Image: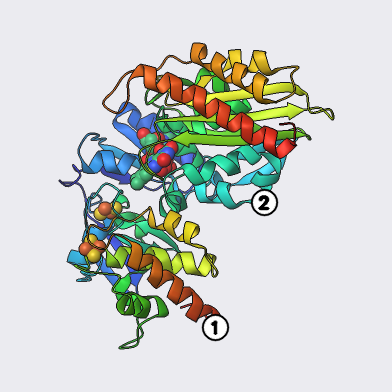
Amino acid sequence: MKPAPFEYFAPETAEEALALMAEHGVEARPLAGGQSLVPLINMRMAQPSVLIDLNRCPELAYLRGEDGMLVSGPMTRQRELELSETVRAACPLIAKAMPYMGHATIRNRGTAGGSLSHADPSAELPGVALALGAEMIAGGPNGRRTVPATEFFFAELTTALEPDEMLCEIRFPEAPAGSRAAFAEVGSHFGGLALVGVAAQIDLDSAGRCTKAALAATGAGERPTRLSSTEAVLTGEVLEKQSIAEAAEAAAGDVEPLEDLHATAHWRRRAAVAMAARVLHEIADEAGTR
Amino acid sequence: MTARREVRVTVNGRAYARNVEPRMLLVDFLRHECGLTGTHVGCAHGVCGACTIVLDGVSVRSCLTFAVQAEGKEITTVEGLADGESLTALQQAFHENHALQCGYCTPGFLMSLTEFLRETPNPDEGQIRERLSGNLCRCTGYANIVSAVQMAAQRLREKGGVS
Ligand SMILES: Cc1cc2nc3c(=O)[nH]c(=O)nc-3n(C[C@@H](O)[C@H](O)[C@H](O)COP(=O)(O)OP(=O)(O)OC[C@H]3O[C@@H](n4cnc5c(N)ncnc54)[C@H](O)[C@@H]3O)c2cc1C
Ligand code: FES
Ligand code: FES
């Protein structure tokens, strides 16, 4: 099948892009990397009548450190997040999760903002953003507003963005010194959309005790889920076999998985527990506490 | 129908200018407008990799890009790899290792792996297989493709070259 006709705009500044979105409203979709939107258009599961291509707005693609934050433009490519030294140093969790997102050729094109705005419940970056407590800066006709990750993801493919709003910037708090990060997921094949994943960043004191735990699961609900019970069990503990087992098991109560063609809700719940255990063991091994 | 737009691109060093509808996919542009039928369409939704080309220096899916997005840009397709009759090290290694059978997937593999060898001159098998996960082959079972990449990588390292 071929795409249905649409009107195409290629603005050169963010301001122009926002003006076009305000003008065309719900009829229009921004086109970022196209790695999720174009398949939908090709299969005619999406038929936007206006496409606003953000690929000619260089000002939307950047990465920089700023006041303890790693700040990314929406059009920064996933491949850059994967390979950038700035990202590796500031937010190692992002660099660790990125290789799981599709394939190198997909990440060459796919963007940070596209993945977060698309909000697939199994996608890695939304889970990472939730675990890290990222902030999304949305821009629209009434100016800019900041939406914390906890309020950004509503449901499958649904975010807090209004139809005339654009995700303009993503701000990730830098990992504190002494913290460690890990990502794990399970799926049918490497590079395909995963079934269930867990992202973790754990702050450890000099004695190897967890002072703060941040974990989020993907694919275990209609949106990425913070594993608050796991975090509570872990805080104040040294990561070793027993504490990890208890903390991971607590994840079963945090997730609200749905049943679909690929897996039962029960399977997804157990997979979230298993992935939580896997990331915590990886962190304990790295920290030498196990 | 929506207004046609002019698309001017350089493909394998040659300039093309055509008027196309915005909805025309880059892969259809290359095949039907430029007559470069080496780039194949397997799935048209990003999963098979048969349509992989190089746009602005990086590998991309030409079925997930509209032709209008390539306006003013440089493209390399599989036809741009060999220098006349002389194959690249990777193409030669595909030939010697029987890394293709029907050949439908081959252009996509070559485009993706050419980039891979430039970025990863000394890959281990795990890295090769991870990279191969982005392209589907229904014939070979991949083993011979892995061997071809290993042979090409070794020859390129001996030569100290890239292509
Ligand atoms: C073969 C294959 C494998 C994949 N595997 C994975 C995987 O394992 N994990 C994974 O997470 N993803 C995977 N994906 C999808 C991922 O690659 C996409 O990159 C991502 O979901 C969307 O990013 P994009 O930049 O391509 O956005 P697009 O496809 O261009 O856009 C996606 C949606 O977001 C909207 N949008 C884009 N940018 C903005 C913005 N700045 N403001 C508001 N709305 C915006 C668009 O209008 C559209 O609705 C895969 C894709 C393919 C083709
Ligand atoms: S035809 Fe483009 S990936 Fe299959
Ligand atoms: S050689 Fe036939 S699909 Fe790969």
Ligand 3 quadrant in view: bottom left
Up/down of A130 relative to B34, above or below? above
> In the rendering, at what x and y percent does residue A245 appear?
60, 20
Q: Chain of mark 1?
A: B
Dot 1: what SS? Answer: helix
Q: Is residue A144 visible?
A: no
Residue denoted by label 1: B158
Q: Is residue B37 visible?
A: yes
Q: Amino acid at mark 1?
A: Glu
Left or right: B15, with A149 as reference point: left
The quadrant of the rendering that contains the C terminus of chain A is top right
Q: Residue at x 62, y 45 (%)?
A: A63
> In the rendering, at what x and y percent does residue A117 appear?
44, 31
> In the rendering, at what x and y percent does residue A192 appear?
37, 42
Say the numbered circle drawn on residue A95: none
Q: Residue at x 46, y 41 (%)?
A: A16
Residue found farthest to the bottom: B85
Looking at the picture, the colour scheme in use is rainbow
Residue denoted by label 2: A85
Left or right: A237, with B150 as reference point: right
Indicate the quadrant where residue B160 lies: bottom right
